[in-house]
Image (spheres, helix red, strand yellow):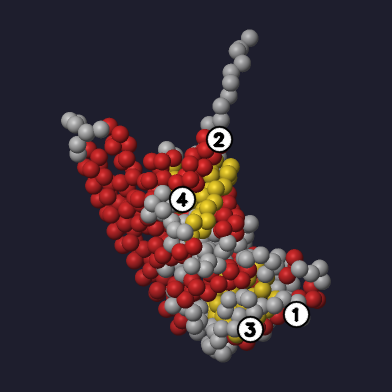
Amino acid sequence: MPRNRETKPTGPQTERAVLVAVEAKKRGEQLWGLQDTLAELDYLTRSAGAEVVATVSQRADRITPTYVGKGKLEELQGVLEEQRPDVVICDDELTPTQQRNLEAALQIKVIDRTALILDVFGRHARTREGQMQVELAQHQYLLPRLIGQWSHLERLGGGIGTRGPGETQLETDRRIIRRRIQKIESELDSVRQRRSQYLERRRRSATPMATLVGYTNAGKSTLFNALCNAGVPAEDQLFNTLDPVTRRLHLPDGSELLLSDTVGFIQKLSPTVVAAFRATLAELSEADLLLHIIDITHPKAPEQAEVVEQTLNDLDLGGKPRLLVINKMDLLTNDPADVESFDQIDLTAIAGADSPAVNGRVFISAAKGWNLPALLDTIRNQVVEAVPISSATAV
């Protein structure tokens, strides 16, 4: 009889992660509390396919060269010995020195929030442009951190045979990455030129354009599908939509406009990441109207709206006309008739609600299709003031 053989899985194993967050007093007043930002980091980690086995947090006067203080570092070492994770994920963007110091102290892979976001981006980039933008951001993030990749050579000690190879390899890697960055930037320039030509054709067609914006997972893609039957993925995941998608939207009076769905925003988004996705976010600058989708059921809805407003300001789009679309009303009422005249929500805490650029608000449920005709009427009334509505020509 054949002997029983032990079978071992050959697929990739789920990484086990320990999350670490620090709330520093010297940063001033923060929009997000420590537990809120840890909860979002947990969500990001699971979106990246890892399992969270423990969390460690600290309130401190300042961020240290090892990110956490000495006592908290010892506590973290104890957690690692107990849980045996594969990676430590920090809630802020670490400096290269902080990352090296932590890895030296913990003897484990350490990544930060930016690296985690880029990993999630990489999972959801479907077009060539999106993939190039993710790769560019990853290389720009990695370049100043390359020296940490060769820290193992330091353990060889001094003497013959150990002077030079590490530095030589490091400089070789830097040159390779710089050349790759230059190549990607050149390719993206070509993409931007084609996109500019496409946007110019759209402008000449005099077809109004609207773009969905909002915090990630606010329901933008669900609304996009409901309005345009676009069939884009709309799952309960962060950054599920990375590449911009544009579809024709037929309005009740028979006219048309172009509606685009774009990547969602998130707190603590690195300027490097924002800069890398400026080509994708060009859809925002070309829009006649921004539809700011807000998940009104989220406990941090005001803070999420503030992040969106801040990001729009960073992109010089703070004055762009926009409409607040208050989503997920089906989670607050069982009666669709209530949505049209809902007056139980105080929107004064929602960032931008009183901005001169905000031209009204509409309460909807994208998942149930509630009040979408009223939304379409409002969109038409908004864009007709900026661009004469007409039957669109092909673009």
Alpha carbon of mark 2 to alpha carbon of mark 1: how far?
A: 51 Å
Q: Quadrant of the N terminus?
A: top right
Q: Please report contact status of discs 3 and 1: CB closer than 8 Å, yes or no.
A: no
Residue under label 2: 82
Snapshot quadrant of residue 8: top right
Q: Which amino acid does label 3 sit on?
A: Gly
**Residue at coordinates 19% horizontally, 31% vertically from top-left?**
159
Q: Please report contact status of discs 2 and 1: CB closer than 8 Å, yes or no.
A: no
**Under tag 2, what secondary structure?**
helix
Does residue 329 appear in the picture of this structure?
Answer: yes
Query: Which label belongs to residue 154?
Result: none
Query: Which label belongs to residue 68?
Result: 4
Q: Which amino acid does label 4 sit on?
A: Val
Residue under label 3: 360
Density class for disc 4 (Cα within 10 Å; few <14, some 14-19, many ≥20) is many
Q: Please report contact status of discs 1 and 4: CB closer than 8 Å, yes or no.
A: no
Q: Which of marks 2 and 3 is nearer the N terminus?
A: 2
Q: Which of marks 3 and 4 is nearer the N terminus?
A: 4
Query: Which label belongs to residue 343?
Result: 1
Q: Which of marks 3 and 1 is nearer the N terminus?
A: 1
Q: Please report contact status of discs 3 and 4: CB closer than 8 Å, yes or no.
A: no
Q: Which amino acid does label 2 sit on?
A: Glu
**Residue at coordinates 31% horizontally, 41% vertically from top-left?**
150
> Measured from the top left, where is residue 113 in percent x and y?
48, 54
